[in-house]
Amino acid sequence: MRTTARFPMYVGALIAAVTLAIAWEGTTVAAQQRAAAPAAKAPRTPWGAPDLQGIWNTNTAVPFERPREYGTRAMMTEAEHAKALAELQERNQRPGRDSRTVGGQPGIGTEKDVARAYNEFWFGDKPTRLSYRTSMIINPEDGRMPAYTPEAARRIADKRDFLAALLQGTSGGRPGPVSPRRAERSPDYNLDRINRADGPEDRGGPERCLGDNLPVTMGTGTFGGVMQLVQSPDSVSIYYDVGQGQGFAWVIPITNRPHLPKSLQLYHGDAIARWEGDTLMVDVTNFSDETNFRGSRENLHLIQRFRRVDANTLQMEITAEDPTTWTAPWMAVQELERADEKTTLVLEGGCHEGNYGLLGMLLNTRAAEKAFAEGTGPDPATQDNATGGGGDN
Amino acid sequence: MRTRFGVSALAVGIIGALCAAFFAVIAGQVSSPRPVAAQSSAPPITRQANGKPDFSGIWQANNTANWDLVTHEAMPARVMQTGVQGLSPVPAAPMLALGAVGGVPPGVGVVEGDVIPYKPEALQKKQDNFEHWLDRDPEIRCYQPGVPRAMYMPYPFQILHGTNKIMMVFEYANAQRTIHLDQVEPYPNDSWMGHSVGRWDGDTLVVDVTSQIDKTWFDRAGDFHSDALHVVERYRMLSRDAIWYAATIEDPNVFTRPWTIAMPLYRRLEPNAQLMDYRCIEMVEELLYGHLRKQPLVRTWEGQTMTVSVERKVPPPDVLYER
């Protein structure tokens, strides 16, 4: 979901991730050392299995991909950590989105400002801790996503060109006339926010409440998300409350059965788990071409490992491969913190049931087309309804 | 069976009550199952380390409660229109091409006494819901079904009986609910699947369900409730492979007294039983948003014997946003 995030509320998080490396969390060096020690006293369920249950989230920032300055070093030095933490705290003090400018001028009231939709209030809950990890990705050793295969690079570039063409001539796109490509179909099963609203398929996955993508890494702050894990002897269930109501339940059977036939495509894939010592190893295949994790679609093969590092830490390890998308497999690690189960309720999403946004976007676009036809409004094709406003800073 | 007669709501009510009284005899005592578990040959139920029954597994009701909680005859279609005689209505246009597949299967009721004790004005609304089923049933729009409806929809669901919490995940719409066996804060608002808190009464799990939104229904017959809904569920193992499920429904805005439904939930015994996706959000996009497309997509369907025509309408804003 984060890869397709064109929602305004993600824009802030993405900017933060890119510029200040704060969007994801990790752990301290001390916790990392604990992780390396044998977990002799891993908590057990009443039926004797390793106990992963609880409500888990995080307020510790760590970027998904490593800023290049760290090279192949997975951990910061004390001095680097102190400097990065100071930057994070300084960033938290800034007025943020409400003070952004557009074209060097105050942005308040501009089309871009309105398109951003969410003011600073919605981003009020900032991460307070910073991991010593320089990135969640630990393999490849530069901590960055492996290169796309030529085939994947081509399809991703095709889509980028299509998105850019439909923004041409708007405040969010390059200068030029309205592109004739507005009449074309999307080159892929669209999950991006297209600058067009001919029908629901033009709107982004999250806008259609189809943003429940695996794998989930937790963000920090207001939109960071939380997960609730419940175990029975033969299954594990995770409820992810992520992305403003995109919440979904993922049931993972612990079983020896083989995967479903390759022809069967499931949105959350076909998950099969087994215990590797105290670690739950989940193998997921049979994804659908309607999913998109960082460019990977139906050929994603995901292995997720969950283990209890200590009483208050759950470690998630993600190994992903897709030879039709990436030139190499990659691996990421994230540590989650245990929330107080008495006071932390994981709330129901209800995105689809309350989806007035999609209804309003289509209705409004039809109204704008009518106004344009009657000479009382601008051509909707010249308006930016896709970038979420962006901004100069 | 009610629309078959095409008469006034009053007459429908009287006939309905007569039918209900008749079928109540057939339906018998819905809350008194035979004690299957007592048979010596039956394997013992699965229990947790603390001695309590373990409800984990994939389960499914096998009845017609989702069509109508009370006893009902077969109908040619849920939506009918007047036929050539007053007593012979025919399936309405949206159902017609479906033939026998679009009919309503008959079934004995799951309501104790086979009558839902509506207040008079609420009964009127239920009848109105029945008449406007296609426009109103939240199931048609892929909305989360609420409790108890989620428990007897025609889809499997999985119970994960954890240490302090029980999670239920439903194949329909990927709906889910958590039953808190531990102490938690009250739910801060209303929700589609409610807030569930469980406790043990001997071997029976008793679940108190509150904080439900007023937009869910009980079945495809228009049975409804308000946001004052309070449901108390009772789960009891009948055998290793069956749960006796009962739910007492209380809503002083709609009903004159609490009433109870009860039914078995059966374990899905297939060795390869598993939940799959019924991710219906995308399936209903054309239904929900098709009338707002720039170029209308679904207008007619052509078969060998029939053309079905679809005329899309944009309802007035209050209806548009409230549906």
Image (cartoon, coloured by chain):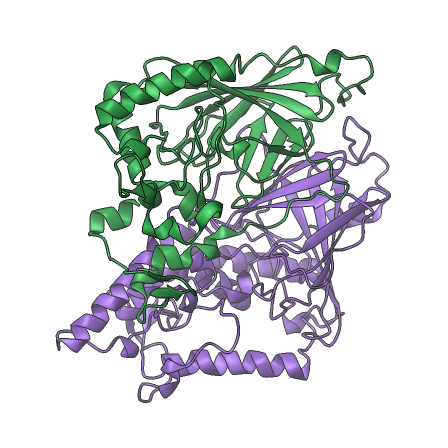
Q: Quadrant of residue A303?
A: bottom right
* Residue B217 locus on image (x, y percent): 39, 33
What color is chain A drawn in? purple
User: Can you see residue A94?
Assistant: no
What color is chain B drawn in? green
Residue at x 26% of width, y 75% of height: A380
Question: Quadrant where the N terminus of chain B lies?
Answer: top left
Relative to residue A101, is residue B27 depicted above or below? Answer: above
* Residue B294 locus on image (x, y percent): 30, 70
User: Can you see residue A260?
Assistant: yes
* Number of marks in picture: 0
Q: Quadrant of residue B35?
A: top right
Relative to residue A183, is residue A120 depicted above or below? Answer: above
Instruction: Name the foreground residue: A107 vs A57.
Output: A57
Q: Is residue B103 left or right of residue B202?
A: left
Q: What is the residue that sits farthest to the bottom in this orientation?
A: A176
Q: What is the residue that sits farthest to the front in this orientation?
A: B85
Instruction: Name the foreground residue: B93 vs B314.
Output: B93
Instruction: Name the foreground residue: B319 vs A114.
Output: B319
Residue at x 43% of width, y 42% of height: B139
* Residue A154 locus on image (x, y percent): 60, 83
* Residue A239 locus on image (x, y percent): 59, 43
Q: In this view, does B60 lie to the left or right of B248?
A: right
Relative to residue B270, is residue A116 depicted above or below? Answer: below
Question: Quadrant where the C terminus of chain B lies?
Answer: top left
Relative to residue B254, is residue B38 depicted above or below? Answer: above
